[in-house]
Amino acid sequence: MTQDWPRPSEEEIRSYREQGFREDRTLSRLLRERAAARPGATALVSRSGRLTYAELDARVDRLALGLAGLPIHPGERVLVRLPNREEYVLTLFALLRIGAVPVLALPSLGPAEVESLARTADACALVVADRHGRSDPRAEAARMAERLPGLRHVLVAGDPGDVPARSLESLLAPRAAPLDEAADPEDLALLLLSGGTTGTPKLIPRTHADYGYNARASAEACGVDSGTVYLAVLPAAHNFTMVSPGIVGVLGAGGTVVLCPDPSPTTAFGLIEREGVTLTSLVPALVPSWLDEARRTRADLSSLRVLQVGGSRLDDATARRIGPELGCHLQQVFGMAEGLNNYTPLDAPDDVVCGTQGRPLSPADEVLVVDEDGATVPDGAPGELLTRGPYTLRGYYRARELDALRFTPDGFYRTGDLVTRTPAGDLVVVGRVKDQVNRAGEKIAAVEVEEHLLAVPGVRAAAVVGLPDPHLGERSVAFLVTEGPVPSREEVRAAMLGRGAAPFKVPDEVRGIGALPLTGVGKVDKKRLRAHGGA
Ligand code: OOB
């Protein structure tokens, strides 16, 4: 049988398990056990209302039965593209309960990217919301279903409208006896989207055992317990919001998850006060607006104990303002959907909390900082971070050729991040060797945008780089060699959206250039472009 994804050896898995670095139950059983232990405690708060653990677990059973009846079979992939609403959590756990594999897509993706994911995963169903900003995900999904023969079902959170689709609500079985677990902890639980450096998005396989451990160990590192009230501000399908410690970590500990429908500080502050939120997580680009609003607001934020910030580099000066101005602890999180999570310890001195991106979560996380030849560099010197461990992938889903580039022969994942390590073992992110723009925490593969740009009439050559930006951290800048006039940003935007790209991937700036600078071996010299752009 050809393997869809490589896993650690039996020997490694046994050793991780023996040392407690793997969860020995499925993610769905985790919820079931919490519901048995504290049925009346509040599990989930959203615009749809409040659900206790017993209610959430029972609704998950009812939806699971409906999904199984469609039928969706164990092992089949289902693309889930939902914003922060109750149906997201229900769908996630219901799919896990029947052993189907959710593919978590961010709602901000464009239709072309969603379709490409659905193809790679060979998805049998697509779950979308009835609205998302100005777009109609239902109509997009219905069009996709016509093109993808394997896509049998379009399911809608909310009103299915007049497309051939079913509402999730209509699938809820009237009553359901608790279903038996369909999966084994070492089975594939879900597929996450990689930030990526390639033209098509890559999928990250995560098992119940590794994802559950990621969530549980993160919950411990972040002091999460049954009194924790977590506000999910960032997209729920992002790994940060899922397991760092996120929704899964907090539900696994018996705490309460509050879904924030949008990331604006006014919405969030209202919920922090109303629900007594103790923990939340943000990308750095959102922090300034939260600090500004904190000065103006009359909302009581005193329940907030920890603000986690991660996804891209937080600058030292902003980091130092968080404690005094929001009245809570800052925790920096340097994580990746591929696995490795680093956290600054909650009790660490300011220099560590504000000036580093933390240390690996697990004693079993192996990290190496290496130079271009793969040799380990001394503490304090920059090098690429390589990692291997109990919850870090060993290869992407159905992407054997890529694995040869992104993993060392002994299974270390090449993160593409340039870091230094302090003698105490804390990591500082100093740059990147991967060809990617990190725009406000959203990862954009340069080559993907370049392919879109080359399709714009008159564009001969294109290169995309990230340049420092005070609001976004990095803004994406496209350098174009053209025949005739350089297209405006608006023209580029229209062309890219017409090709189904996500709006956040449209370059923030478009500049003409006579020729792209090349390196000695003839590759586009992005270092020089960055220097040129900054000038
Ligand atoms: C998180 O996950 P992804 O998969 O969207 O992106 C991972 C990449 C890292 O390789 C690194 O390049 C960058 O995002 N990154 C950071 C960072 N946290 C992530 N760069 C600098 N400082 C940080 N604190 O972004 C993610 C996943 C789980 C938890 C938190 C973030």
Image: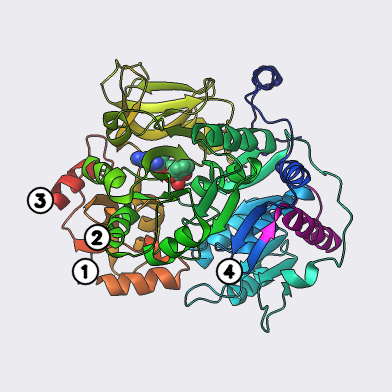
Q: Which of marks 1 and 3 is in front?
A: 3
**Which badge, 2 or 4, is on the more N-terminal residue?**
4
Q: Nearer the viewer, mark 2 or mark 4?
A: 4
- Identify the secondary structure beneath mark 4: loop
> How many other residues sit within 10 Å of disc 4, few (<14), some (14-19) or many (≥20)?
few
| Dominant secondary-structure state across the stretch colored magenta | helix
- Identify the secondary structure beneath mark 1: loop
Between 285 and 339, which is closer to the camera in this rendering? 285
**Which badge, 3 or 2, is on the more N-terminal residue?**
2
**Which residue corresponds to mark 2?**
480
Give, as a three-letter code, the residue at label 2: Leu
Image marks 2 and 1: residues in contact by CB distance under 8 Å: yes
Disc ID at residue 535: 3
Q: What is the x, y in percent for residue 123?
A: 69, 57
How far apart are the alpha carbons under marks 2 and 1? 7 Å
Write down the quadrant of residue 301 in the picture.
bottom left
* Magenta highlight on residue 71: yes
Give, as a three-letter code, the residue at label 3: Ala
How far apart are the alpha carbons under marks 2 and 4? 45 Å
Asked if residue 142 is positioned above or below residue 194 in the image, the reply reads below
Q: How many tags in the picture?
A: 4
> How many other residues sit within 10 Å of disc 1, few (<14), some (14-19) or many (≥20)?
some
**Which residue corresponds to mark 1?**
486
- Residue shown at 32% from the left, 50% from the top: 326
Q: Which of marks 3 and 2 is in front?
A: 3
